[in-house]
């Protein structure tokens, strides 16, 4: 039996995740109180092999009930994964303002106060989630496609990498497990003939990757990654996001992330690449 717990920040895309799994023939239960999780699994065991449950953890009491239910399921040797949907605070506030609905933990104050309370409450849960997806820069369709890609790989017990190039001036990705800062590399932006190009172009990639400091940086990171990936697998964390950043997310981070993607694919590691800020 496969059980996926869909949780995370309100407004980050839990309903979208539930719809994607339901369309993929998962048995989905929405808005289930944590105390009902164990009775539900016992009830549907043998009838459904893939069960997804959306749990909205809105209080410390709910969180404690959820932790107890999760522990009981693991003792039953049920294969449980936690999918945590996240988004930047300012994006969540904007989404609630657009819908003109109050945040569930707002308590008569600002939307931002409700978001802050929820983030503090869910901090430990986010840290233990096997899959964390940041929907900040994704629309509903893009998030749905991302969730579909992740769950299409569940039968594979290997490690899966999502590489993301980004610009620091647009914010650090929320779901990064590793963040590589490429701002120490000489910037092609200041070379007139390279400025209109990107890190996907050969001339820019050559300037970035031929730098001895870049080569050392990449080799040191690959050594670090290869020394930790088995530990991640043993801890049940098979989906890792590696974020590679430079100032604007157009030259240095793109060139390095393209190189790393090819390197990981040569190692037969399932790897996807997204350039978040390339066209900004």
Image (cartoon, rainbow, N blue to C red):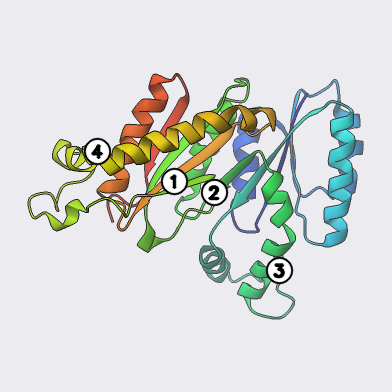
Q: Are marks 2 and 4 in contact (CB under 8 Å)?
A: no
Which of pointers 2 and 3 lies earlier in the amino acid sequence?
A: 3
Give the label, 4 or 3, closer to the camera. 4
Quickly name the residue at label 1.
243
Q: Residue at x 71, y 68 (%)?
A: 117
Q: Secondary structure at mark 1?
A: strand
Mark closest to the chain's N terminus, 2 or 1: 2
Mark identifier at residue 175: 2
**Residue drawn at the location 76% of the way across and 22% of the way down:** 49
Q: Nearer the viewer, mark 3 or mark 1?
A: 1
Determine whether the residue tagged by mark 3 lies in a helix, strand or loop: helix
Q: Image quadrant for the N terminus?
A: top right
Distance between the alpha carbons at the discs numbered 3 and 1 = 27 Å
Measuring from the top left, give residue 123's x and y in whole percent: 70, 56
* Residue 80 placement (x, y as % from top left): 76, 33
- Rounded to the nearest angstrom, the CA distance separating label 2 from label 1 is 9 Å
The first of marks 4 and 1 along the sequence is 4
Q: Position of residue 26 (x, y in %)?
A: 69, 30
| Residue with the most extreme left position | 193
Q: CA distance from mark 4 to mark 1?
A: 17 Å
Inspect this view and state whether residue 35 appears. Answer: yes
**Marked residue nearer the N-terminal end (4 or 3):** 3
Q: Residues within 10 Å of mark 1 (few under 14, many from 20)?
A: many
Numbered mark located on residue 233 in the image: none
Query: Residue at image x 84%, y 48%?
Result: 66
> Can you tell which of label 2 and label 1 is closer to the viewer?
1
272 or 107: which is nearer to us?
272
Q: Which residue is mark 3?
A: 117
Residue annotated with mark 4: 209
Q: Is residue 23 above or below residue 211?
A: above
Task: Determine the secondary structure under disc 2.
Answer: loop
């Amino acid at each position: 039996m496969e059980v996926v717990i869909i949780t995370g920040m309100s407004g980050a895309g839990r309903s979208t995740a539930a719809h994607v799994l339901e369309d993929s023939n998962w048995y989905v239960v929405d808005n289930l109180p944590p105390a009902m999780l164990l009775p539900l699994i016992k009830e549907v065991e043998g009838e459904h092999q893939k069960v997804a449950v959306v749990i909205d953890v809105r209080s410390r009491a709910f969180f404690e009930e959820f932790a107890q239910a999760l522990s009981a399921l693991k003792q039953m040797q049920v294969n449980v994964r936690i999918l945590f949907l996240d988004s930047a605070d300012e994006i969540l506030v904007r989404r609630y303002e657009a819908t003109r609905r109050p945040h569930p933990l707002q308590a008569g104050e600002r939307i931002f106060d409700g978001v802050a309370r929820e983030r503090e409450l869910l901090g430990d849960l986010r840290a233990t989630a096997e899959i964390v997806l940041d929907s900040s820069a994704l629309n509903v369709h893009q998030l749905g496609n991302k969730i579909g890609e992740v769950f299409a790989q569940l039968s594979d017990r290997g490690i899966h990498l999502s590489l993301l190039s980004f610009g620091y001036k647009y914010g650090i990705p929320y779901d990064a497990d590793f963040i590589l800062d490429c701002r120490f590399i000489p910037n092609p932006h200041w070379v007139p003939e390279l400025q209109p190009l990107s890190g996907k172009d050969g001339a820019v990639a050559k300037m970035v990757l031929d730098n001895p400091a870049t080569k050392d940086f990449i080799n040191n990171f690959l050594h670090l990654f290869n020394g930790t990936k088995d530990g991640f697998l043993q801890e049940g964390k098979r989906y890792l996001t590696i974020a590679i950043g430079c100032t604007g997310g157009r030259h240095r981070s793109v060139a390095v992330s393209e190189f790393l993607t090819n390197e990981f694919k040569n190692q037969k590691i399932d790897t996807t690449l997204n350039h978040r800020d390339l066209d900004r």
